Image (spheres, rainbow, N blue to C red):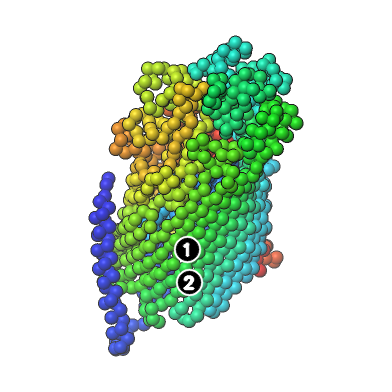
């Protein structure tokens, strides 16, 4: 189904223009009334409409002030009780349990390490949590605090005690909020009515005796006739947890040729040493690879004699996984102040400010290092018994050069990525009325936010120092000798990478009634804003990447590139609510909601987007609703200006083990690949991520539409019961994406005319490893279509109180929240020969993550007197993992469904003003299903499944 988006936008603009023109008439009518007071029989007492105006608030998903609980926008609310009952000290884990969230969402389990790679986007231990609504990615979910954007969308930095509730709108909302609100909006509503002082302590530990967390928070509030102030501080600390603490993650598991192999990295302390065929076969009897060479490794002795070596086996790997963190070490300190003051009955000032510091760290195994990093071991070096030169490329004048050498410097120790991230945001302004008796109100605010992330990577190898040590006689072939290890690790460095972002915004809004129609009052909201965002990423000089050699002065994977940029945007927006019918047969009410927004970006031009929404209540208990809106996402600063960054993903290369005839059918994708090729060694290949402007390209906004049709039923005959069913569809074209190495190679493999083919660079026939991927460029581009559709179903029932004879069982409530994904379609190269649309619904892939068809939560709550309890079950449907075999392309495996259960019990002791809560998460201690090497980390999908296992927590809260 397709819609003419231009016609939709035009229709909305015309309708709103008519409404805007009526403002003048409305103002004249108000003036006339003031000059000529009505007669006694014309005057009316304060009405229900007046009460509505006084109590109305702006609801998430609309600019219109409403008193209605349910509108055309399908908002799911997480209230304070739900946040408290979860027992979580940070909000990330609370939000990421929601069924509407799927795909590759960041959390402290999947950003705990990163192979040492330096990138503005990589948070290899940053401790952040981000949200991916509808599985569309974290860049297509807009995170707000009281309707204001966050410069850093890490929701873990928000103090939970600052939040009154969280509104989650899982539909496109670009006309209300602008760019990025494609998958939806997460709006954290601030707590403004707190009275007294509250102090809370919390602690938790897993049933494995690790992953401890603890913290405290202190919140105080005071209000008077003209003022209100709430403030607090929050502290929480999480211990690191090594991957070796769990059976499923203690070693990297590979699925290769149908067999599960407990393997690891081919960069091993005893060396992966490539030798010419005559030496490898003649001296050691090694089977030769397709390029006529073979690898050996140290078997005994100090490596000074040829007899100290043997043929390297496939089982000769290094278990790097055992030294990685599966939970990031984290420490957070937060503070916030929320205040307001009534200068006059019609003028209020307000300020909302918060600050967060997150200190965290991730860990990686000791550095893998070799000729790919620029190291050269000359044939004339006395430590080299082989008579060949080990180097990345052939050395002029040395016919026996260009052989590969790779090792792991265990003597240098683990690499630790330490982060200090400071976030601050302040939103201040005035709001008031246009006259004492006017329904029109205005709001003027300024917003400033700043984020600085300081990343320091310890124990990164200094290549010139390592080269000097090797040239000076340090026997890199014999790392078992502590003296050698000391010499080789003497030159380690600590590069510093600093990411700074800031946002400055000024905004003015006005809203009020236009005129009374037979069905009710027509309302209008208008506004304008100006926002400027800046980004700067700096890298230590010795860690700056050379794009020609793909190296720098330290370990190749830690090389990065500086980047900086800014943009500004000017926006005008309006929305009107028009009552069409009321109190008619089959039309208890019928409203139409129209919205439009024009955005002018200094980097990507202007765009105008519209919305049409219908609210129809055929009877008072039933709301039928539908929304069609245009959505867009302007390229962000990282997508535009990030410098080149070396990323080293595992590549599922389709050119492996092909015959000469098969290779001839793929001459570009498999260029220089010899017949029966064994594949890339190592399997982790070099790719260059970069922003578009860095490589001379430009980007435009991705655009599309969001459609939502549904109903809400709250029957009067069943008090406390409410249910909703919403069908949704989101479509995007010209998607902004940093393409993956897998996508580049597979697209070219399937279509030699693919525009991606030029991005692949393999070693040529002059290399000792022809066909090996040297580099794949993976910049951000506008290319591809993405669409997803499905349905959400909710049930909420506060069961009326009942007695069981003379026994009062207490009060119960039950809730179901579920989301079904019917389709998730991607066409990576639309319009190109051989392009195909792939439906990822019900699958797991590295590119899109976990798109399980069905997710849901069931919650049963109980309270009686000072007691309360909650049971919650979270369900993730079965799915299919794609491309999971490292040797055979296209292999799929089934992944079973998983259900997690958690319980909470609380008891209040009024005499000491204290409440105690205890809980258990993942009661059954379920381990996550295996994805092997395609898992986002530790062989599993840590964006979706729990990795810590059964977890106990407790909290004590004192309020006075």
Residue lying at 60% horizontally and 29% vertically, measured from the top left: 376
**Dot 1: element:** strand
**Percent position of residue 471, x then y:** 66, 30
Taking the view exactly as shown, the residue that stands out farthest to the right is: 483
Q: Which residue is mark 1?
A: 504
Mark pair 1, 2: CA separation: 14 Å
Which quadrant of the figure contains the N terminus? top left
Residue lying at 38% horizontally and 71% vertically, measured from the top left: 510
**Percent position of residue 926, x then y:** 58, 38
User: Would residue 581 be visible to someone looking at this image?
Assistant: no
CA neighbours of label 1 inside 10 A, class few (<14), some (14 to 19), many (20+): some
Residue lying at 55% horizontally and 71% vertically, measured from the top left: 339
Rendered image: mark on residue 263: none
Q: Nearer the viewer, residue 669 or 793?
A: 669
Q: Nearer the viewer, residue 642 or 880?
A: 642
**Percent position of residue 542, x then y:** 59, 43
Which quadrant of the figure contains the C terminus? bottom right
Q: Is residue 347 above or below residue 9?
A: below
Q: Earlier in the sequence, mark 1 or mark 2?
A: 2
User: Is 479 positioned to the left or the right of 630 in the image?
Assistant: right
Q: Is residue 539 above or below residue 32?
A: above
Taking the view exactly as shown, the residue that stands out farthest to the front is: 397
Q: Which residue is mark 2?
A: 429
User: Is 278 positioned to the left or the right of 782 in the image?
Assistant: right
Looking at the image, do the residues carrying marks 1 and 2 touch, with CB atoms under 8 Å apart?
no
User: Would residue 597 be visible to someone looking at this image?
Assistant: yes
């Amino acid at each position: 189904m397709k819609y003419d988006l231009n016609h939709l936008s035009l229709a909305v603009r015309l309708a709103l223009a008519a409404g805007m023109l009526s403002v003048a008439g409305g103002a004249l009518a108000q003036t006339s009334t003031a000059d000529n007071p009505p007669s006694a029989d014309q005057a009316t007492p304060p009405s229900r409409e007046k009460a509505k105006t006084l109590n109305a608030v702006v609801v998430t998903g609309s600019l219109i002030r409403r008193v209605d609980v349910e509108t055309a926008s399908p908002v799911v609310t997480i209230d304070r009780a739900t946040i408290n009952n979860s027992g979580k000290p940070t909000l990330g884990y609370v939000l990421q349990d929601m069924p509407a969230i799927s795909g590759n969402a960041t959390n402290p389990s999947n950003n705990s390490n990163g192979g040492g790679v330096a990138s503005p986007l990589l948070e290899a231990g940053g401790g952040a949590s981000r949200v991916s609504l509808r599985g569309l990615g974290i860049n297509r979910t807009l995170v707000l605090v009281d309707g204001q954007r966050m410069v850093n969308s890490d929701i873990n930095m928000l103090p939970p005690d600052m939040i009154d509730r969280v509104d989650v709108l899982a539909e496109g909302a670009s006309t209300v909020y602008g760019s990025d609100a494609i998958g939806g909006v997460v709006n954290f509503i601030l707590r403004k009515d707190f009275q007294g002082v509250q102090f809370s302590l919390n602690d938790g530990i897993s049933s494995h005796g690790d992953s401890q967390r603890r913290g405290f928070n202190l919140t105080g509030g005071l209000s008077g006739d003209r003022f209100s102030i709430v403030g607090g501080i929050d502290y929480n600390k999480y211990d690191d947890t090594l991957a070796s603490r769990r059976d499923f993650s203690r070693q990297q598991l590979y699925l290769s040729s149908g067999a599960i192999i407990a393997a690891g990295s081919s960069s091993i302390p005893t060396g992966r040493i490539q030798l010419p065929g005559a030496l490898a076969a003649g001296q050691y009897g090694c089977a030769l690879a397709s390029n006529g060479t073979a690898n050996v490794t140290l078997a005994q002795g100090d490596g000074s004699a040829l007899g100290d070596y043997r043929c390297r086996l496939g089982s000769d790997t290094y278990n790097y996984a055992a030294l990685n963190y599966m939970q990031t070490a984290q420490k957070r300190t937060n503070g916030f102040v929320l205040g307001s003051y009534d200068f006059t009955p019609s003028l209020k000032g307000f300020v909302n400010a918060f600050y967060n510091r997150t200190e965290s760290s991730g860990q990686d195994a000791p550095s893998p290092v070799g000729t790919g990093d620029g190291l050269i071991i000359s044939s004339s070096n006395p430590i080299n018994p082989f008579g060949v030169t080990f180097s990345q490329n052939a050395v002029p004048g040395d016919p026996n050069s260009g052989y590969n050498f790779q090792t792991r410097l265990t003597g240098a120790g683990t690499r630790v990525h330490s982060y200090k991230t400071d976030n601050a945001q302040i939103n201040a302004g005035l709001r008031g009325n246009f006259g004492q008796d006017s329904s029109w109100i205005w709001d003027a605010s300024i917003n400033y936010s700043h984020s600085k992330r300081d990343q320091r990577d310890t124990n990164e190898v200094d290549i010139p120092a390592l080269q000097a040590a090797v040239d000076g006689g340090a026997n890199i072939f014999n790392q078992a000798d502590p003296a050698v290890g000391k010499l080789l690790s003497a030159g380690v460095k600590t590069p510093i990478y600093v990411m700074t972002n800031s946002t400055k915004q000024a905004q003015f809004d006005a809203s009020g009634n236009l005129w009374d129609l037979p069905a009710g009052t027509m309302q209008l909201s208008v506004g304008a804003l100006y926002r400027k965002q800046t980004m700067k990423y700096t890298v230590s000089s010795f860690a700056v990447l050379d794009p020609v050699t793909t190296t720098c002065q330290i370990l190749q994977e830690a090389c990065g590139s500086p980047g900086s940029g800014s943009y500004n945007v000017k926006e005008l927006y309006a929305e009107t609510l028009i009552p069409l019918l009321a109190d008619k047969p089959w039309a208890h009410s019928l409203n139409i909601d129209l919205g439009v927004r024009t955005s002018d970006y200094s980097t990507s031009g202007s765009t105008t987007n519209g919305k049409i929404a219908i609210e129809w209540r055929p009877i008072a208990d039933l709301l039928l609703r539908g929304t069609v809106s245009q959505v867009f996402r302007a390229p962000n600063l990282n997508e535009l200006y990030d410098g080149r960054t070396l990323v080293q993903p595992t590549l599922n290369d389709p050119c492996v083990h092909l015959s000469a005839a098969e290779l001839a059918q793929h001459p570009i994708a498999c260029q220089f690949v010899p017949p029966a090729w064994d594949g890339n060694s190592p399997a982790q290949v070099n790719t260059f991520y970069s922003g578009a402007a860095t490589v001379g390209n430009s980007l435009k906004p991705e655009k599309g539409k969001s459609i939502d049709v549904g109903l809400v039923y709250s029957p009067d005959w069943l008090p406390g019961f409410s249910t909703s069913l919403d069908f949704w569809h989101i479509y995007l074209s010209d998607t902004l994406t940093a393409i993956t190495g897998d996508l580049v190679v597979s697209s070219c493999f399937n279509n030699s005319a693919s525009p991606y083919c030029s991005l692949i660079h393999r070693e040529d026939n002059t290399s000792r490893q022809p066909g090996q991927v040297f580099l794949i460029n993976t910049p951000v581009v506008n290319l591809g279509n993405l669409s997803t559709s499905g349905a959400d179903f909710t049930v909420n029932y506060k069961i009326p109180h009942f007695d069981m004879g003379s026994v009062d069982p207490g009060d119960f409530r039950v809730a179901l929240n579920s989301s079904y994904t019917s389709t998730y379609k991607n066409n990576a190269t639309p319009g190109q020969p051989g392009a195909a649309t792939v439906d990822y619904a019900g699958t797991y892939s590295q590119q899109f993550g976990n798109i399980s068809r069905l997710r849901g939560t069931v919650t049963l709550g109980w309270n009686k007197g000072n007691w309360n309890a909650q049971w919650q079950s979270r369900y993730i449907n079965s799915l299919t993992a794609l491309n999971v075999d490292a040797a055979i392309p296209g292999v799929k495996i089934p992944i079973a469904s998983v259900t997690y259960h958690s319980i909470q019990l609380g008891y209040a002791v009024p005499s000491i003003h204290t409440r105690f809560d205890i809980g258990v998460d993942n009661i059954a201690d379920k381990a996550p299903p295996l994805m092997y090497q395609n898992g986002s980390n530790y062989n599993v999908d840590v964006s979706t499944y729990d990795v810590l296992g059964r977890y106990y927590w407790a909290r004590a809260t004192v309020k006075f």
